[in-house]
Amino acid sequence: MKSLIVANWKCNPTTLKEAKGLFDSVKKALLRQRLRTGEGIKNIKNVEVVLCPPFIYLSSFKFQVSSFKLGAQNCFWEEKGAYTGEISPLMIKNLGIEYVIVGHSERRKYFRETDEEINKKIKKALSVGLKIILCVGETTEEKEQGKKQQVLIAQIEKALDRIPRDEMKNISVAYEPVWAIGTGNNCSTDETMKSIISIRQIITRLYNRETADKVRIIYGGSVNGENSGSYLKESLANGLLVGGASLKPEEFIKIVRSAT
Ligand code: PEP
């Protein structure tokens, strides 16, 4: 299974010029990495790299992408209609974008996104042919109250409610403990491994072992060029979701390199 390295730019940067600059730097750095390792232009062996810029920049990048994939950071749960301000999964798909992040903790927190809404988004996005990166993870309070397992079960069961087994190949799950996002307060690789095993067990119970084994379960939370290799080697993570460090091209490439 190819590792999945996802760059979540969140609400950054604030001008198209800067976004293009960042995009070009990442593209060039990926290219250098390929030349260095003597690999073909299309693929870094065993790694799938997905950049998720803000919606507004996606169409500017679409035609330039050859060496990595693009994803959106969110989507709506309907295809079209009177929903002012929303971006539909079909619009994203029709732009030629392959991935969408659903259920990021910042959307759950600041936009009060519920598990039921996340489930509706996943269903619609799958129906138009998008691939999903579903984010789950416990908050500080939930961790302190010993509720991590309960939270993971509830989030995954609700998000995957009535998602057919044959769609699971289009879903990756990102374990992102909320207390580790953007804080520098990393989850230990041991704790991450335990969570990844739990998540795979939950998916096994909902579907079966064969299906669960094909789902990529990745880690996100203060990943950088120094610690990325340990997550990939020691925690059973099939990839990484990177926020802050994905805005620094050289740092991001270090992370990609650690997955090759
Ligand atoms: C994220 O945006 O999901 C994330 C993990 O951010 P950071 O890497 O900055 O912690």
Image (cartoon, rainbow, N blue to C red):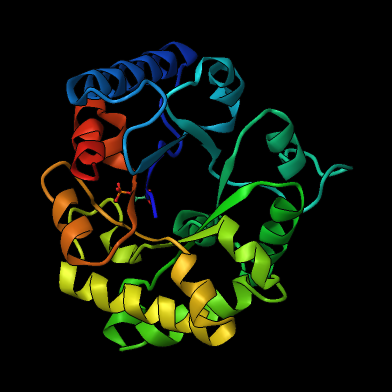
Across and down, in percent, residue 11 comes to 46, 35
Residue 28: name its quadrant: top left
Residue at the location (25% across, 73% down)?
Answer: 193
Can you say whether 27 is above or below 103 in the image?
above
Residue at the location (48% across, 21% down)?
Answer: 66
User: In the displayed image of the protein, which residue is found farthest to the top?
Assistant: 17
Q: Quadrant of the N terminus?
A: bottom left
Residue 161: name its quadrant: bottom right
Confirm whether residue 188 shows in the render.
Answer: no
Residue 105: name its quadrant: bottom left
Left or right of 30 in this view: 104: right
Can you say whether 119 is above or below 68 in the image?
below
Residue at the location (55% across, 23% down)?
Answer: 57
Which residue is more in the foreground, 128 or 60?
Answer: 128
Can you say whether 212 is above or below 20 in the image?
below
Which residue is more in the foreground, 94 or 238?
Answer: 238
Left or right of 200 in this view: 220: left
Across and down, in percent, residue 29 comes to 26, 20
Give the tally of numbered discs: 0
